[in-house]
Amino acid sequence: MSLIAVSKTKPVAAIEELYALGHRDFGENYVQELLSKSEVLPKDIHWHFIGHLQSNKVKQIISFVHLIHGVDSEKLLVEIQKQSLKAGRHVDVLLQMHIAKEETKYGLDEKELSQILANINNHAYPNVNIRGLMGMASFTDNLTEVRNEFRQLKLYFDDARKRLNETMFDTLSMGMSGDYQIAVEEGSTMIRIGSLLFGKRS
Ligand SMILES: *Cc1c(COP(=O)(O)O)cnc(C)c1O
């Protein structure tokens, strides 16, 4: 189980505090904020980009990003491939699935996932390591609903792993401060925790 400390909107000093305790994996949602923090913080931090990434901003983070969690379109994947090749890197990514009831959350549907998996098997993305899936459950007090959504994501994950020829596919990023216990019970391998670690965001 890995723990990503989600430090968005929090000051550099808050990250340094956890870093001093030995933590190295931090998550950020905004490109500009990630750039300014990574510039002043130690280089051995693993930066996770967990927000919605616009294609035109990929090149700004590609040289150092550790894992891009929110790949939610083929267009974005094409751009990540292009920029990774240019940078001479192999970059790890997760495909983001839409599992919540809310329309507002980003992510792929089953058909889009299927198309991407086919293209991966056809070697369309040689510089991109598709490491697994990511998803966000509905923001609701209905814990049965949340559990069902995570369970669905785990099914997509198991199915995708079977379909892929290569087997670096080992990461299921699901669970935040409010629902990580359920996510872990449903098979999460990576939780993204912000407010429980750093306090509420304003
Ligand atoms: C902000 C955010 C988190 C952390 O949320 P908390 O509820 O503060 O733990 C996790 N994942 C994503 C994608 C986020 O945007």
Image (cartoon, grey):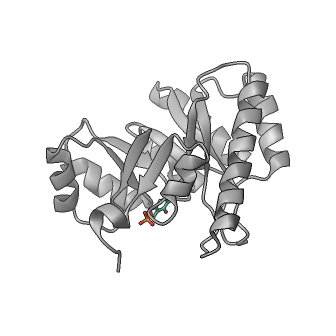
Residue 189, horizontal then vertical, whole percent = 51, 40
Please tell me which residue lies in front, 67 or 157: 157
Front-most of residues 21 and 178: 178
| Relative vertical location of residue 62 with respect to residue 39 in this rendering, above or below | above
* Horizontal relation, residue 52 to residue 100: left or right: left
Residue drawn at (49%, 56%) of the image: 180
Location of residue 160 with respect to 73 vertically, above or below: above
Q: Quadrant of the N terminus?
A: top left
Residue 48 image position (x, y, % from top left) = 42, 46
Between residues 196 and 75, which one lies in front from this camera angle? 196
Quarter of the picture holding the C terminus: bottom left
Residue 85 falls left or right of residue 7: right
Direction bottom: furthest residue: 202
Q: Residue at x 39, y 52 (%)?
A: 27
Q: Nearer the viewer, residue 191 or 48?
A: 191
Q: Is residue 104 visible?
A: yes
Can residue 174 be seen here? The reply is: no
x and y percent of residue 141 in the render?
A: 60, 76
Instruction: Give left or right: position of 164 versus 130.
Output: right
Task: Please give the name of the residue rendered at 67% of the width and 72% of the height, measured from the top-left corner.
Answer: 104
Query: Whole-percent x and y of residue 79?
Result: 62, 42
